[in-house]
Structure formats: C-alpha cells, structure tokens
C-alpha cells in the first residue's frame, strides 16, 4: 500500500495531497472498488488502474490542490471506446466512480534550540497533528535528541548555520526560537523576518532581552511593524511559571489556540 507511505511522507514534509479511491466499479475495470492512489502536486503513490482513467483523476486531484479545495468530490467515468478524454480511450467496457478526498497539509512547527525547553515543547507538541522540526547548531545536542525518537512526526536537524534550515521550511510554518546563544537567536529572528511568509515567529526571553533585540532588528533594517510580528515572550501570558515543563504547556496551549486544533 504505497499510498500509506505517501501519506506519511506528506505529513513529514507538511504538504497537502488528494486521496483517490475507487468507490464503485461496474463491468470491466482495471482495478476493483477500494483501490487507492495518493496524488501530490509533483508526484503520486499507488495506482487506480493506469491509462486515461488514472491520468484524468490525477489532473482533477491536482486542480483541487491548486484551488485549495477542502470538500471531497466524486467523479464518474466510462471506460469504453466512445468515452474519449485528453489522454485517449480506455475500452475496458466498464464504469467507475471515484472519491477524491483532500488531505490537508499538517501545520509545521520548527523549534530552534535542542535545550531543556525545546525538548519539553517537542514532547508536548508530539501529541498534536503537526509536523515538527527540531534544529540545533550543536552536534552533541542533536545526538541527545535521539531520546525523542518516540515522537513520530519529528525531524531533527544538525545545522551549524541554523538559518539555512529556517529558510528551507514551507511557507506558513510556525517558528520558535530558543537557541543556546543570543547572537544565534538574533540571526534567526533576522532570517525569519526576511522570509516574510511564516505563520508566526516566537522568541523565548525576558522583556530586557526583547528590548535589546527590538533595537538590533531595527538597526538591521526591519520596520517596526515587522519587528512587532515577533512574539516575545512566548506562550500564554497568564501562565507565568519558568520551568521547562510549564513553558512547554504554555507554548502548546498558545499554539493549539492559534491553530484551532481540536
């Protein structure tokens, strides 16, 4: 069942797809009812029968992706010499009905900093339907992150220049910055603002740290409105505890609210 592999791959990447299922077949058809295929923007997994049937359904699925469709649709096709599509004929003699179900891209959350707080946040977020990234410039910190292997949606990255990993995230990603080094945090804030297409940017820190960062980010050329798009401190303001576990609860609650996760 290659389509299951595809679903896992799309979840890891934070990408959308369309699951195509033959829900009814009459007469002769290349595959029986229940056959599935997963279609992404640039690839597909499994098959519902090949030929113009599959090509036509793939086109429809990609059109749904392009339009951002969220409602499933059904498509009925005849497989005879009189039914000609842009891909030619398929004269099996049957008729099939396919269900095309959009599979939304899971939200992507990237934590920059594999310290105590970063680990606790990943553990808390690991229970939610998210694609998670944990990035650190220190190899030893990344090696220790192996203990988080039970979080199936997590990808751990060693990035000596972590801003390169930030630039590879998909548009709309939520970024949390909490590295071991405030100068690295500043570089990441600068890189995040220059992207301009992230879902949110959060920076761990005190009011004093944020005041210094605001000044430096303005000196780097960012307008006040851009700088104000960074949330510092992170989490729910009414949760004031400072232990890593409490911060993780606060951050998870804020993200759950922002993403409307149910």
Image: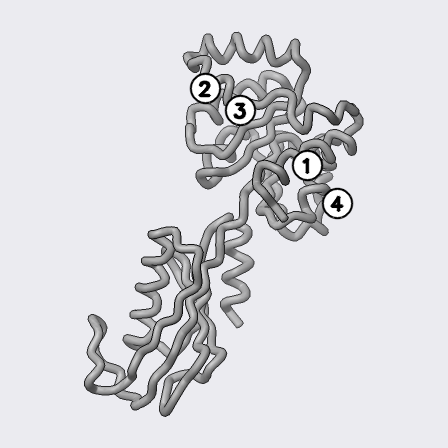
Where is residue 14 shown, x and y percent of the image? 51, 48
Where is residue 210 shown, x and y percent of the image? 61, 13
Labelled disc at residue 102:
none
Question: Which image quarter: residue 246?
Answer: top right
2 on left or right of 63: right
CA distance separating discs 2 and 4: 36 Å
Q: Are marks 4 and 3 in contact (CB under 8 Å)?
A: no
Query: Which residue is the site of mark 3?
Result: 188
Query: Which residue is the site of mark 1?
Result: 253
Residue plotted at (65% across, 52% down): 152
Q: Secondary structure at mark 1?
A: helix
CA distance separating discs 1 and 4: 24 Å
Labelled disc at residue 147:
4
Identify the mark nearer the N-term, 1 or 4: 4
CA distance separating discs 2 and 1: 24 Å
Neighbor class of circle 3 (other Cα within 10 Å; few <14, some 14-19, many 20+) is many
Neighbor class of circle 2 (other Cα within 10 Å; few <14, some 14-19, many 20+) is some
Identify the mark nearer the N-term, 4 or 3: 4
247 on left or right of 164: right
Q: Are marks 2 and 1 in contact (CB under 8 Å)?
A: no
Q: Is residue 8 above or below residue 172?
A: below
235 on left or right of 162: right
207 on left or right of 23: right
CA distance separating discs 4 and 3: 25 Å
Labelled disc at residue 226:
2
Q: Residue 38, can we see it?
A: no
What kind of colouring is applied to the model shown? one colour
Residue plotted at (19% across, 85% down): 82
């Amino acid at each position: 069942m290659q389509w299951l592999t595809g679903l896992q791959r799309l979840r890891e990447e934070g990408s959308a797809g369309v699951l195509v299922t033959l829900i009814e077949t009459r007469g002769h058809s290349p595959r029986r009812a229940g056959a599935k295929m997963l279609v992404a923007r640039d690839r597909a997994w499994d098959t519902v029968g090949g030929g113009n049937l599959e090509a036509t359904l793939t086109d429809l699925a990609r059109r749904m992706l392009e339009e951002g469709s969220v409602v499933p649709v059904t498509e009925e096709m005849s497989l005879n010499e009189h039914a000609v599509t842009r891909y030619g004929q398929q004269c099996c003699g049957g008729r099939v009905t396919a269900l095309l179900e959009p599979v939304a891209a899971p939200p992507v959350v990237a934590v920059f900093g594999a310290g105590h707080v970063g680990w606790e946040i990943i553990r808390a977020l690991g229970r939610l339907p998210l694609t998670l990234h944990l990035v650190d410039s220190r190899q030893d910190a990344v090696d220790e992150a192996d203990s988080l292997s039970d979080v199936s949606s997590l990808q751990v990255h060693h990035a000596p220049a972590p801003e390169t990993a930030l630039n590879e995230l998909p548009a709309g990603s939520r970024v949390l910055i909490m590295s071991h080094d405030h100068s690295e945090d500043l570089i990441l804030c600068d890189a995040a603002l220059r992207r301009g297409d992230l879902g949110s940017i959060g920076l761990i820190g005190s009011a004093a740290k944020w005041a210094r960062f605001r000044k430096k980010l303005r000196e780097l050329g960012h307008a006040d409105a851009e700088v104000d798009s960074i949330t510092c401190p992170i989490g729910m303001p009414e949760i004031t505890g400072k232990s890593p576990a409490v911060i993780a609860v606060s951050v998870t609650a804020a993200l759950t609210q922002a993403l409307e996760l149910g």
